[in-house]
Image (cartoon, rainbow, N blue to C red):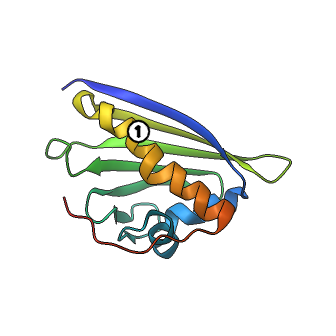
Amino acid sequence: MKTKNIKQSLTIKAPAAKVYEAFMSEKEHQEFTGLPAVIDPTVGGKFVTCGTLNFGYTLHLEPGKRIIQAWSHGNFPDNQYSVIDIELTETKKGSTKLLFRQLGAPDKCVKWLAPGWEETYWKPLRKYLEKGVVRKLKEKKK
């Protein structure tokens, strides 16, 4: 199967520890996405986010600095995983530069995955951490 990589970067006006916690805390993940999340925040721990659409397990963690996960989506072919790598670098002014890489995403999925990260994650994450916007929890089905 053909795969592609996605690379995105952004700056969030919040400390790296807060950005990390928003991803790895069930409560905060739900607050910024507005969708159910179950997250075991340990290496080897499983996660299911955005209702049941995103799922996988954590490969590597550096608190406040890096998250690497084997990541899949309900619309991926069966048993197909990509690897997401989220690298956080705190600036001198207290903001965080987030470098996101998704490696090995199914070629046919990249056209909706890339904008999906922006709409489902980056925009609401900025609103949550920069403005305190908590999204109402709703169920999302496959």
Which one is nearer the viewer's eye here, 28 or 140? Answer: 140
Q: Is residue 7 left or right of residue 2?
A: right
> Could you tell me residue 51's position as x and y percent?
29, 66
> Could you tell me residue 29's position as x and y percent?
48, 67
Task: Indicate whether 71 appears above or below 55.
Answer: above
Q: Is residue 130 left or right of residue 78?
A: right
Which one is nearer the viewer's eye here, 112 or 44? Answer: 112
Residue farthest to the left, as pictured: 78
**Label 1 sits on residue:** 115
**Residue plotted at (68% across, 60% down):** 130
Q: Amino acid at mark 1?
A: Pro
Q: Is residue 142 left or right of residue 6?
A: left
Q: Quadrant of the C terminus?
A: bottom left
> Is any atom of residue 63 visible in this view?
no
**Residue plotted at (20% across, 43% down):** 76
Q: Quadrant of the N terminus?
A: top left
> Could you tell me residue 56's position as x and y percent?
32, 56
> Is any atom of residue 126 visible in this view?
yes
Q: Tell me the quarter of the picture where residue 36 sits.
A: bottom left
**Residue plotted at (35% across, 64% down):** 47
Badge 1: residue crowd in 10 Å (few <14, some 14–19, many ≥20): few
Dot 1: element: helix
> Could you tell me residue 23's position as x and y percent?
51, 61
Which one is nearer the viewer's eye here, 16 or 120? Answer: 120
